[in-house]
Image: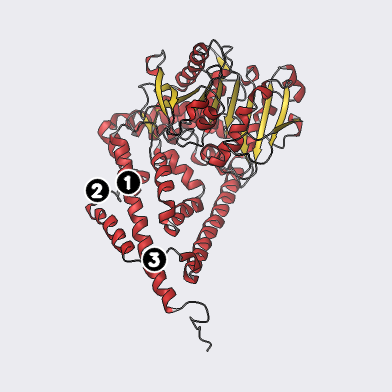
Amino acid sequence: MKTIDPEAQGMSCDSWTRYWADAMWRSLATMDLMRQRADNMLDHQAAGMPPLLHFEGKEIADARTFAPPCNYRLLQITSCPHHMERHVRRDGVPVIVVDPRAGHGPGIGGFKRDSEVGMAMLEGHPTYFVVFDPEPVEGQTMGAVVEALARFIDIVAVRHRNKPPIVYGNCQAGWAVALALSHCRREAALAVLNGSPLSYWAGEADVNPMRLAGGLLGGVWPAHLAADLGNGQFDGAWLVQNWENLRPEGVWKKYDQVFAQPDREHERFLEFERWWGGFYKLGREEILSIVRDLFIGNRVERGEVVVDGHCRANLAKLRTPLVIFCSKGDNITPPAQALGWLATVFGTTDALVRAGQRVVYMMHEHVGHLGIFVSADVAQHEHRAILHHAAAIRALSPGLYEMTLDAAADSDERAARASFAPRRIEDLPYEPRPAGFDKVNDLSIRLDDWYSQWISPIVRSLSNEVTAQWLQFSHPMRTSRLLWSSRFVPGTALLPLMSTALQSMGCADDQREDNPLYTIERGCSQSIASALESWRHLRDKNAEWTFKSLYEA
């Protein structure tokens, strides 16, 4: 029988010793990062979970004083640790950045220098940021949020001699901005919708399974049940758990990347996780409207969403030029959901031209959903270019255009050059209203009516603040983090001492990438990620088959 010679394979005794010592140190360093993340999470909660902004700002308006009220506030960005405010021109077009409220808190549009806020300041724009509180106002509705955003746009315009602002809407905030601008004749200089779904049923088979969730779960009633169990509030941790379940290999890679290089990934991991683990809540009426009217009912395309009791949000009446930034690598808001609504609302390019509307879309080849908002490279290239060429976009003739950029430019020198190629709605390869989803909407209405009549009163009578807080605390997204905290498990307080001791003993190997055993480890990790990805594809194909069997027959 053939034997393996470790020396011949480049695996000397020294390689084994260095690898296992380094692996032990990396394990302790990774566990200590989990401890720091948990303690940061508790500190953030104790501070009231303030917005995680890299910039300083002052409050201009508080929507809790509006009628109807909501938990949104408008901040004016006043300064930056890198003194980017020196670029701001007093006569510049104001920019408002609105972050998504989809389980997390505000901050991704401006939690580092190279961000949407940073690029707006670098381009000389007076910049504003919309934040929201961890808990909604009692009885808060989706209409109240849309109305607050519309009033914020008016307030900023008045502060700048009635100069309409450029409004950035990220993900969920994108459709909220679109609704705010599509009723009561409100306008902005430009609306930038980043990874924002407006065509909720659209998507590619086996690639975008999230759009099937309503049909596979039976409609809106599970969200209704979760809000009832939460004593009238929907825990955003459920939404964050959905994002993680969508791509399990991504979760593996996130932690594996930390284990592979804990010294290199330390700051980046803790910075992002502080935002990712800050779970915000939505009101019962608010989440039901979002799920029922938008994601399952798809009523935005038909102009059937009533904003303030008397005025319908009609995308056909939008007069603000639109920039739609989407990516082929985005599996949460694919290009089909960002652009498919154009065929439903306008039908043809000629109709778009007759409406006097300008729609510019920009397609990234590979960046993921979060990368659209948080990637420094995307901020320096795409977002800076959008702001730099805002005047050129507004000067375009009515119609549909694709915006393409030259190679990335140095953020301290100039923005990338842009070109605008005319396109036709008829040529967009997206089906906004695929078969089966109308049946999902009908089923959702019937099941929620049944739940509201027979089950909801019982659940509400059994729910109170104590039970809601217990359910919130015991949610897996929280317990999986808090169990690493030294405040819950005192023994984890020893992790930094143990990690430092091993590091001082020389266990941390700076040359680990040259070790063949480390190479084998990385290969095994990649195999696990590939297996998870294969399982995900199988799961998504099964979901697609189940959906078609139930609703397209």
> As shown in the figure, which amino acid type bears the numbered disc 1?
Ala
Q: Which labelled disc corresponds to residue 22? A: 3
Of 158 and 286, which appears nearest the observer? Answer: 158
Q: Would you say residue 263 is visible in this rendering? A: yes
Nearest-to-viewer mark from 2 and 1: 1
Residue 483 lies left or right of residue 397; in this view the side is: left
Q: Which residue is disc 2 drawn over?
A: 488
> As shown in the figure, which amino acid type bears the numbered disc 3?
Asp
* Residue at point 59%, 32% (across, down): 384
Q: Would you say residue 200 is visible in this rendering? A: no
Q: CA distance from mark 1 to mark 3?
A: 24 Å
Q: Which residue is disc 1 drawn over?
A: 38
Instruction: Residue lying at the far left in this picture: please name it.
Output: 490
Q: How many marks?
A: 3
Q: Dot 2: what SS?
A: loop
Mark 2 and mark 1 lie on one chain; the one further toward the N terminus is 1
